[in-house]
Image (cartoon, rainbow, N blue to C red):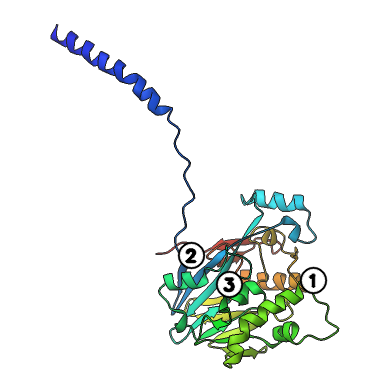
Amino acid sequence: MKKITQSILLSAIALSTLPLMTHAKNVTQPAIAQQKQVAGFYQHQMGNVQITALLDGTNFMSPDMFKDISKQQVQQILKKYHAAQSKGIQTSINAFLVNTGSSLVLVDSGAASCFGAHLGSILKNLTAAGYQAEQVDTILLTHLHPDHVCGISNNGVANFPNATVYVSQDEVNYWLNPKPSQVKPADYTQTVAMIKKAIAPYQASNQFKTFKLGDRIQGFEVINTSGHTPGHYSYRLNTQDGNVVFIGDIVHSHTVQFDQPKTAIEYDIDPKKAVQTRLKQFAGYAKNGDTIAAPHLPFPGIGHIYSADGKSYQWLPVSFKD
């Protein structure tokens, strides 16, 4: 009898709480707000060299930016790689801080405020990585487009006061000492104004220098990879774990231009030459197994290039290491 009474009592308690439980299930949870990401830096060790990838921010490109390929083909490629983007084709803007043990070298510098408030995080992320801007002694620019040069200064003041800035003489000639016969893109005047403003404090202190093919800077070999711009150069550094190449803008998409490497982009000043450069460099990187550091591939932009057939390629990002 006692057991029956206890059973009835437990059943009554369960029934009395049922409406509460049902009501709890129907409560609508508030939407979860997008949280800020952690600091955008990633440190990659190659033998005696430490490479710190620094994220400046993220941009989105229209499928119309790609040449000699239909918008439908672009969308098919994005879908194949699960990279469809409602805002456009996502691209990172990265820079790379290289600690060789004897020098602290920054390769490219991001866009700073030249293209809007969604970019310009290089200095913040450099500090988060444990460095100070004053420690940087060398800046290597792959070319002078604003998303690579604007980050070196702010309102006429050098962001890296102890650094010497290097860029190819061909690049300076194109943007700052043009020949009357040169055909310029429509936004040439605005771009030149941004370039001049960025480099001015370094020119004033004699910390802006040019190089030519065959030169070496702090152990970095310069490689002519023109096409995207007339004086576009990449940089190769030999380490105990092999070569690392800072490729600049020979590629802008890890999906479209790896799947279809003959596809140029609107930003290329000489599209035909840009494609030729990409095909040549990609084939070499895939064959040699070089480590690649790229400013517009998904952050951290460090990895390898693979090809199964020599016609199309795949981007293999580095595995996370702590």
Q: Are marks 1 and 2 in contact (CB under 8 Å)?
A: no
The answer to whether one can see residue 247 in this image is no
Measured in 3D between alpha carbons, the distance from the residue under mark 2 to the one under mark 3, in whole angstroms, is: 13 Å
* Amino acid beneath label 1: Ala
* Residue at which label 1 appears: 186
| Residue 136 horizontal side relative to residue 247, left or right | left
Mark toward the start of the polypeptide (3 vs 1): 3
Whether residue 86 is situated above or below residue 261 in the rendered picture: above
Nearest the viewer among 71 and 130 is 130
Q: Are marks 3 and 1 in contact (CB under 8 Å)?
A: no
* Residue at which label 2 appears: 40
Whether residue 5 is situated above or below residue 280 in the rendered picture: above
Whether residue 207 is situated above or below residue 250 in the rendered picture: below
SS assignment at label 1: loop
* Amino acid beneath label 3: Gly
* Amino acid beneath label 2: Gly
